[in-house]
């Protein structure tokens, strides 16, 4: 056994043989800190997700308008989609692009435990973030019809879950390194 392992083993045996218990207040503080890390506040997590989505949406809407809504005039990916794949597929690709970018950023910016909660409650997160995005488009005065909206939602759904899956896989891979 290496010298370092002997030291660790000796420290552990010394710790286990200790007769003085950890003071109750310190034990409760440690358990509370661990609990906060394992079970993050849903309110704080929602605010993080919402903030990231809002920031990424400004960029996304600058590159690919959604239902005619643009943030800034940088580039219009929608015209490229329309030119090569047509209007119907464009709606799916626009929703996919919008949510894939947002979800990928969310997963990359959050810590591992927050990502776990987002993945566990993915339907609720998609409903809230998607509902907010759709409500914002409506508030801005876009004309949204059932069929195009359905296609956009299908793309958004695929982009959301693709972003979560790829981002979580990247996080797992980086943890192994």
Image (spheres, rainbow, N blue to C red):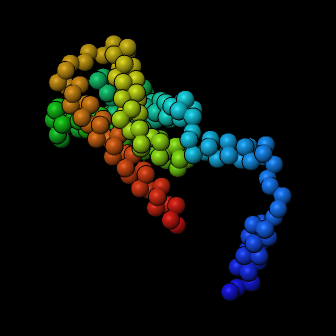
Q: Is residue 112 left or right of residue 102?
A: right
Residue 54, percent from left and from top: 47, 29
Q: Is residue 147 left or right of residue 78?
A: left
State which quarter of the image contains the N terminus. bottom right
Label tally: 0
The residue nearer to you, when weighing 143 against 30, is 30
Residue depicted at x 39% and y 46%:
164
* Quadrant housing residue 16: bottom right
Is 173 above or below relative to 132? below
Outermost residue toward the front in this view:
19
The residue nearer to you, when weighing 32 against 167, is 32
Residue 128, percent from left and from top: 40, 27
Question: Can the viewer see residue 70?
Answer: no
Is 74 above or below relative to 177? above
Residue 69, percent from left and from top: 35, 23
Question: Can the viewer see residue 89?
Answer: yes
Residue 62, percent from left and from top: 40, 31
Is 96 above or below relative to 11? above
Residue depicted at x 37% and y 50%:
165
Residue depicted at x 77% and y 76%:
10
The residue nearer to you, when weighing 62 against 100, is 100
Q: Is residue 154 left or right of residue 112?
A: left
* Quadrant housing residue 36: top right
Outermost residue toward the bottom in this view:
1
The residue nearer to you, when weighing 3 against 125, is 3
């Amino acid at each position: 056994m290496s010298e370092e392992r002997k030291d660790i083993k000796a420290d552990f045996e010394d710790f286990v043989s200790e007769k003085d218990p950890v003071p109750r207040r310190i034990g409760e503080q440690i358990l509370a800190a661990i609990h906060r890390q394992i079970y993050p506040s849903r309110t704080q997590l929602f605010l993080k997700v919402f903030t990231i989505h809002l920031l990424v949406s400004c960029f996304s809407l600058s590159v690919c308008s959604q239902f005619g809504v643009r943030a800034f005039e940088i580039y219009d990916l929608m015209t490229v989609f329309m030119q090569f794949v047509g209007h119907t597929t464009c709606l799916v690709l626009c929703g996919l692009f919008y949510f894939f970018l947002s979800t990928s950023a969310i997963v990359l910016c959050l810590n591992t435990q927050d990502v776990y909660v987002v993945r566990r409650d993915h339907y609720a997160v998609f409903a809230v973030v998607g509902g907010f995005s759709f409500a914002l488009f409506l508030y801005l005065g876009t004309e949204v019809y059932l069929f195009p909206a359905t296609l956009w939602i299908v793309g958004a759904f695929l982009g959301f879950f693709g972003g979560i899956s790829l981002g979580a896989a990247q996080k797992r891979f980086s943890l192994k390194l």
